[in-house]
Image (cartoon, rainbow, N blue to C red):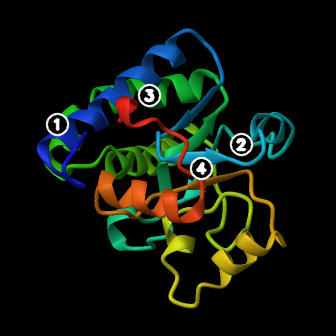
């Protein structure tokens, strides 16, 4: 595993993510891509297969609305792809953007740049769920100073599909946070 976000191992893992999505896209399947730091509370696939049908891609919001990830702020650790010629071309283009991924230490930044370009040039339709929606939370919600989202989650007043432990410095912190939430299910031999 990577020591932390952006180190050499992290960037190599970003390329592995690009390769696996590209390969499945080439087989003409719809794709639900997710990082390993996600817990499912409900199966999101029926939702993706029945909602927002006019979009090619559906993304979790990253939470960080900085210029680096503008204009979409799409989280590349959890997204759904409807196979079509537009999405296949997008992932072909991402595969050919390895230099940008290496330079930025992030396939997310490269992917967002391509989402913007392909939307403008080829009519790619991308939806990013708003970061304030309750269905697809992540590190943004976990680290909110108010703690409002997490209190609602623990009280059971909201029922998200997944929880993505993004925005976390390293693997040790992710494990600690999952343990604190009572959501760590992996045996030590598997880590």
Q: Mark 3 vs mark 4: which is more N-terminal?
A: 4
Under circle 3, the secondary element is helix
Using the image as rendered, state which of residue 150 and residue 112 is in the foreground.
150
Residue 99 is tagged as 1
Q: Is residue 1 left or right of residue 174?
A: left
- Up the image or down, 76 lies above or below 94; here it is below
Q: Which callout, 3 or 4, points to the residue nearer the camera?
A: 4
Calculate the distance from the C-alpha at mark 1 to the C-alpha at mark 2.
28 Å
**How crowded is the residue under tag 1: few (<14 C-alpha within 10 Å), some, or many (20+)?**
few
Q: Which residue is mark 2?
A: 55
Q: Is residue 88 left or right of residue 67?
A: right
Residue 46 is tagged as none
Q: Which residue is mark 3?
A: 91
Q: Residue furthest front?
A: 188
Under circle 2, the secondary element is loop
Calculate the distance from the C-alpha at mark 4 to the C-alpha at mark 1.
24 Å
Q: Which callout, 4 or 1, points to the residue nearer the camera?
A: 4
Q: Which residue is mark 4?
A: 59
Q: Residue at x 76, y 34 (%)?
A: 45
- Tags 3 and 2 in contact by the CB under 8 Å rule? no
């Amino acid at each position: 595993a990577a020591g932390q976000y952006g180190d050499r191992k992290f960037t190599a893992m970003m390329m592995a993510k690009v390769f696996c999505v590209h390969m499945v896209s080439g087989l003409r399947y719809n794709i639900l891509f997710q990082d390993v730091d996600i817990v499912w509370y409900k199966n999101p696939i029926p939702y993706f297969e029945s909602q927002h049908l006019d979009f090619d891609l559906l993304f979790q919001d990253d939470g960080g609305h900085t210029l680096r990830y503008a204009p979409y702020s799409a989280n590349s650790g959890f997204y759904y792809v409807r196979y079509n010629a537009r999405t296949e071309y997008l992932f072909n283009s991402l595969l050919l953007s390895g230099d940008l991924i290496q330079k930025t230490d992030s396939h997310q930044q490269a992917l967002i740049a391509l989402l913007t370009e392909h939307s403008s040039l080829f009519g790619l339709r991308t939806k990013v769920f708003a970061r304030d929606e309750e269905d697809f939370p992540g590190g943004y919600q976990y680290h909110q100073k108010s703690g409002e989202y997490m209190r609602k989650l623990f009280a059971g007043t909201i029922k998200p599909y997944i929880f993505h432990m993004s925005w976390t410095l390293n693997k040790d912190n992710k494990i600690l946070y999952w343990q604190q939430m009572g959501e760590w299910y992996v045996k030590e031999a598997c880590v």
